[in-house]
Amino acid sequence: MPAIPIRCAHFRACKSGLVFACDLICPKAGFGQGSPRLDHFLYRDGALFAEDVPVAEIAAAVGTPFYVYSTATLKRHFALFDDALAWGDHLVCFAMKSLSNQAVIKVLGDAGAGMDVVSAGEYLRAKAAGIPGEKIVFSGVGKTAEEMRLAITGGIRQFNIESEPEMIVLDQVAQSLGAVVPVTIRVNPDVDAKTHAKIATGKSENKFGIPISRAREVYAMAGKMAGLKVVGVDVHIGSQLTDLAPFEAAYNKVAELTEQLRADGHEITRLDLGGGLGIPYARSNEAPPLPSDYGALIQRTVGHLGCEIEIEPGRLISGNAGLMVSKVIYVKSGEDREFLILDGAMNDLIRPAMYEAWHDIVPVIEPAPGVEPAKYDIVGPICESGDTFAKAREMPPVGVDDLVAFRSAGAYGAVMSSEYNSRPLIPEVLVDGDQFAVIRARPTYEEMIARDTMPEWLS
Ligand SMILES: *Cc1c(COP(=O)(O)O)cnc(C)c1O
């Protein structure tokens, strides 16, 4: 973890007394005004803090492992997008699949965010957190009639349709409820997002959307359906994009299509441009584009169309707003390496196993300046070689019972966790300034076990 260069003349102190913000982009530190790298998990007085709360204090209160999120970071990241689109009508819809705890949804909703949901469960969670239906867009390739009914009844901003069969079902459901629902059609622009294969969605071989070459035909069908009102075009090409070029290629195609659709007689007033802007996981060497540049790109490619712009960022808002904190159980010496065995495992944070993802892993006690790094394989206790967070990772030496924090764990962390190996789901904690609260408690073993039920013939 590179220390923040406090020597830099541009740094100033924030209200809480934390030196955290810079008025200029500092290429050396990567922290700066408008930079998605900025978060509120910094060392202070020799220990890692989440905003104004020592991480060790949370660990003492809730036990390890756990997730902790920073309210200030969530708000700031939302504001980066909101500001980037300030040139026109827009709604930033948080992709809540990246982090769906209701407290987080409430923080972002209060800041003005809409929500992008992909299931009835997410829809109901958004509603439960107070998000009005008019600010919820429903995405996803496999919405069921039941999910459609639920969202139409509860109120919805729009459905993003992904196929003709889905469109036919939505039309039937809408008509059966006497409703006319606003829709966009998700087009697959056939551009290479140049991201991990499991999260690329914009190539023609992917299961998402309708090939852009067939879009006019499908819009013509939609235009004749009594239960649907075509309002716009939708596109989402993938996740963790670290370059703006694929967005530019996709949005240029969307602009061209919008003009064709208008010529065909459709009233296109909204463009949903998806999510996918990447974040720096390895702070030392990655510099993904800034939301401000992304916003300028949107203005350049589709701004002239006069549409209301929707975007669906998930990871960039939530990713660097969260840590997973874990404890070292054992340090084991292997033949040619040392293993750090943690109490957190792949069931708690699956991204390294699933996407070969890198997470910076840092000690909660600030390492002494100039300390020689150790080299570890950092693993969890599950009986699978896949339960490995990092191999030959250089980090400051730590010992048994020390706490370590996984950075950038807010997105696709808690939401993808499971109880594999009968390990109870780990708690989520939200920090706001000097206060913190558990926003999802760790179930007890009894609660976890009680969810199984015995068939009569076995009892
Ligand atoms: C996953 C997804 C998003 C969010 O992607 P991020 O990379 O987290 O920004 C947005 N829209 C749709 C349709 C998605 O599937």
Image: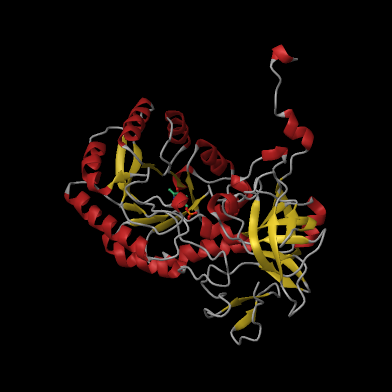
The residue lying at 28 percent from left, 60 percent from top is 252
State left or right for residue 210 relative to residue 458: left
Judging depth in this view, the residue of 180 and 5 nearest the camera is: 5
Tell me where residue 276 sits by quadrant: bottom left
Whether residue 52 appears in this view of the structure is no
Q: In this view, does 186 lie above or below 35?
A: above
The residue closer to the viewer here, 142 or 390, is 390
Give the residue furthest to the left.
Answer: 263
Quarter placement of the C terminus: top right
Q: Is residue 68 left or right of residue 78?
A: right
Marks counted in the figure total: 0
Residue 170, horizontal then vertical, whole percent: 36, 32
Instruction: Determine the residue positioned at 57% across, 54% down.
Output: 411
Residue 269: x and y in percent read: 30, 52
| Residue in view at x 46 percent, y 29 percent | 146
Which image quarter holds the N terminus? bottom right
Q: Is residue 46 left or right of residue 111?
A: right
Residue extending farthest front: 335
Residue 164 in the image, given as x and y percentages of width and height: 30, 35
User: On the picture, is 259 further left or further right than 294?
Assistant: left
Q: Coloring scheme of the render?
A: secondary structure
Along the line of sight, the residue nearer the viewer: 269 or 318: 318
Q: Can residue 131 be seen in this view?
A: yes
